[in-house]
């Protein structure tokens, strides 16, 4: 799910049953939590309040309001041109992974800072650590290769007292490594998670953004050109070989840390990549391999999860 397909007041569903972002946005409550959102409200053809989802500033204001209202995060910002995440969809991944962890906890979702999570490629928005720590009290290590993203994520954490003791942001100094240099001897993680760069080239990423721009321009008052609400830097959108190469490398590196991590996981955007990645996991000696489908409206994404040992 992304905001580019959401030009209505209500959001596509169904979302995970634990996801608080069900049904229509309560704009009265959101404006009360973040008054700056009010200037972006406008009526849709049915007379309900909405925002222009092709306006990047409006979408950022909506994100700030959602984080303030649902999660108590009052200070959130991203630099111009960086990825603006769709919060309802990001929250879905957190809740599916929470259910995964419940399997080894007598069916109860584990809560509190004893649950340790590593977020690979957290981005400037730091969204997964925010949602996971505020939903379940988990403790996060958040990594990124982009110094600006790291600096911004740290600023978000330090600006919100509710995040300071639960999120540590670490810069990955080696752009050719994922877990190496981050997971130290003696570290233990219940979960690693990643939203990998999906595209294989800048050209492919630009083509995808153009399709989103075209979809937005078809809506009421949609912009024919101009600012985009999704944005994204290279490390957020593409890498050589795309998600298949990136996740393959993640699998290879995960072998060395199999006794330090209970579950590894990654979002997979293209279903045709799942069989090849499962085969690679089998060859790597993973004993637990699963693809968890997440359906949000017309979009279906999936979480590939794996582990070593029992």
Image: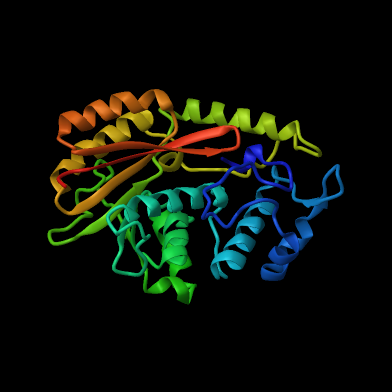
Residue 101 left/right relative to 280? right
Residue drawn at x 46%, y 76% as measured from the top left: 161
Q: Position of residue 194 (x, y in %)?
A: 36, 46
Residue 2 falls in which quadrant of the image? top right
Q: Nearer the viewer, residue 140 or 79?
A: 140
Q: Position of residue 154 (x, y in %)?
A: 41, 65
Q: Nearer the viewer, residue 7 or 100?
A: 100
Residue 282 left/right relative to 241? left
* Residue 111, visible in the rendered structure: yes
Residue 275 left/right relative to 66? left
Residue drawn at x 44%, y 30% as measured from the top left: 199
Residue 134 left/right relative to 243? right
Q: Position of residue 241 (x, y in %)?
A: 34, 27
* Residue 84, visible in the rendered structure: no
Residue drawn at x 66%, y 56% as measured from the top left: 62
Q: Position of residue 163 (x, y in %)?
A: 43, 70
Residue 283 falls in which quadrant of the image? top left
Q: Nearer the viewer, residue 144 or 248?
A: 248
Task: Name the outermost residue toward the front.
Answer: 106
């Amino acid at each position: 799910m992304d905001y580019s397909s959401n030009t209505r007041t209500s959001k596509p569903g169904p979302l995970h049953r634990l996801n608080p972002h069900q049904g229509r946005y309560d704009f009265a409550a959101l404006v009360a939590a973040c008054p700056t959102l009010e200037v972006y409200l406008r009526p849709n053809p049915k007379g309900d309040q909405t925002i222009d989802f092709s306006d990047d500033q409006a979408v950022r204001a909506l994100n700030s309001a959602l984080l303030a209202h649902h999660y108590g995060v009052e200070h959130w910002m991203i630099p111009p041109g960086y990825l603006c995440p769709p919060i309802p969809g990001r929250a879905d991944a957190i809740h599916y992974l929470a259910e995964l962890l419940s399997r080894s906890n007598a069916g109860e979702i584990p809560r509190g800072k004893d649950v340790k999570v590593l977020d690979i490629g957290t981005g400037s928005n730091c969204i997964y650590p925010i949602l996971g720590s505020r939903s379940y009290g988990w403790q996060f290590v958040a990594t990124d290769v982009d110094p600006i993203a790291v600096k911004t994520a740290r600023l978000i954490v330090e600006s919100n007292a509710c995040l300071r003791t639960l999120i540590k942001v670490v810069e990955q100094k080696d752009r050719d490594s994922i877990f190496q240099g981050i997971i130290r001897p003696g570290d233990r993680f219940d979960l690693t998670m990643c939203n990998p760069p999906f595209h294989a080239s800048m050209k492919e990423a630009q083509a995808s953004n153009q399709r989103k721009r075209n979809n937005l321009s078809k809506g009421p008052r949609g912009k024919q050109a101009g600012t985009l609400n999704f944005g994204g830097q290279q490390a957020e959108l593409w890498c050589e070989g795309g998600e298949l190469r990136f996740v393959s490398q993640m699998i290879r590196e995960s072998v060395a840390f199999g006794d330090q991590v209970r579950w590894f996981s990654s979002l997979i955007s293209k279903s045709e990549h799942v069989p090849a990645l499962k085969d690679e996991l089998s060859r790597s000696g993973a004993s637990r391999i699963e693809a968890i489908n997440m359906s949000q409206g017309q979009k279906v994404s999936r979480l590939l999860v794996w582990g070593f040992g029992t």
